Image (cartoon, helix red, strand yellow):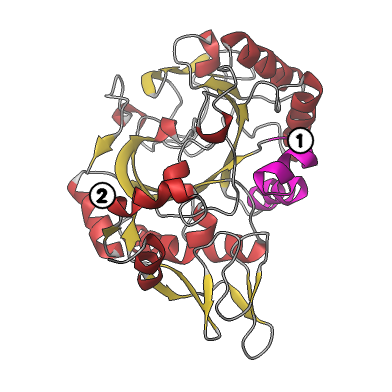
Amino acid sequence: MLTVQQKLDKLTTAASLVEKVDEKTLRCTACAHRCLIKPGRRGICQVRFNQDGELRVPWGYVAALQIDPVEKKPFSHFLPGSDALSFGMFGCDFHCGYCQNWLTSQTLRDPRSNYSAAYIREVTPEEIIQTAKRNNVSVLVSTYNEPLITTEWAISIFKLGKQESMSCAYVSNGNATKEAIQALLPYLNAYKIDLKSMNDKNYRQLGGVLQHVLDSIKIVHEAGLWLEVVTLVVPGFNDNPAELWDAARYIASISPDIPWHVTAYHPDYRMADRANTSARSLQTAADIGQEAGLNYVYAGNIPGRVGSLENTYCPQCATLLIERIGYVVHSYHITADGCCPKCQHSIPGIWPQNPASTRLDGWGLPRAV
């Protein structure tokens, strides 16, 4: 019987995000770790490996495939009310102690995730597109594990999706490289980045480097992709007001129009000993974001308990533009040209071309496919 690693190693293809260092040694350029990988060795993510001088990378399967509300990603300024066909693979370049998707992200790193082999579902890019079409879905999202380390696979799907006029997005930890973003640019519309902390020591506990993520926020924004930033507020880890101020100020320095989502943590994986984030903590974080000059601050993961922080308002005249509870849009008032209907202030984002077609009062829950 094949192990998880043996199964996954068979489901691979040659990398495009790679540099040759010498005859056999390779440097992976999919994420900012830029792993130097010798023959027989693996990158930090464990799923990109050097096989006799060729970098092999994940291909031809999904570990998760379902239809989600786009608000679940979360995106608040990207085709609200839409369904997104969400797909993920195995592996991650971080090892966050509170990961909610650890069974897939920590495969090949945590022995407890070995039985995740049962989730391997062999599939082609063409079959994924057909699944989207069959379910009348026009948004594709690479998510659940870290999409940067499976960029070659995502591009193969997005390329076909673009031929069908679909919109494409990444839900990422932001440990990106210019090479990966450049490769994605022709196919990607939107990018969500997790800004997990403004403390580099905290980031290194998670397996990352703060500056890499700060750089990625700037790179993605300057590349012209629609960007939203999320900070999961974890009690005792990153909820210090000074740190939240640093995060808000940094985002505002790139653009005050970047939406910032402050979301609630619930105990999971290796950090199951901490309390859930309170609605009051999210309100404090949101107040900081607004005081720092951000025009669009949202609170999430505790629907119905954060009041107006689930909604979108015009920063010019305070008109209610989008009313939400959880992942459900209840009213939508942005005009076809992306403006406030009252004062005509331009609202940044990617909006439905036909506002009347925006789905209201939808199901708001994932659907299996």
Q: Which residue is mark 2?
A: 132
Q: Are marks 2 and 1 in contact (CB under 8 Å)?
A: no
> Does 4 sit above or below residue 66?
below
Q: Amino acid at mark 2?
A: Ala
Q: Where does the N terminus fall, quadrant-wise?
A: bottom left
Q: Where does the C terminus fall, quadrant-wise?
A: top left
Residue at image location 60% in from the left, 61% down from the top: 44
Q: Which residue is mark 1?
A: 198
From the image, state whether disc 2 or disc 1 is nearer to you: 1
x, y (%) of residue 81?
36, 30
Residue 39 located left or right of residue 351: right
Residue 144, can we see it?
Answer: no
> Tag 1, which secondary structure?
loop
Q: 6 or 344, which is in the foreground?
A: 6
x, y (%) of residue 70?
40, 35
Residue at image location 48% in from the left, 57% down from the top: 108
> Does 323 sit above or below residue 88?
above
The magenta segment: 197-222
Q: Is residue 246 magenta?
A: no
> Tag 2, which secondary structure?
helix
x, y (%) of residue 125?
30, 63
Q: Residues within 10 Å of mark 1 (few under 14, many from 20)?
A: many
Residue 83 located left or right of residue 154: left
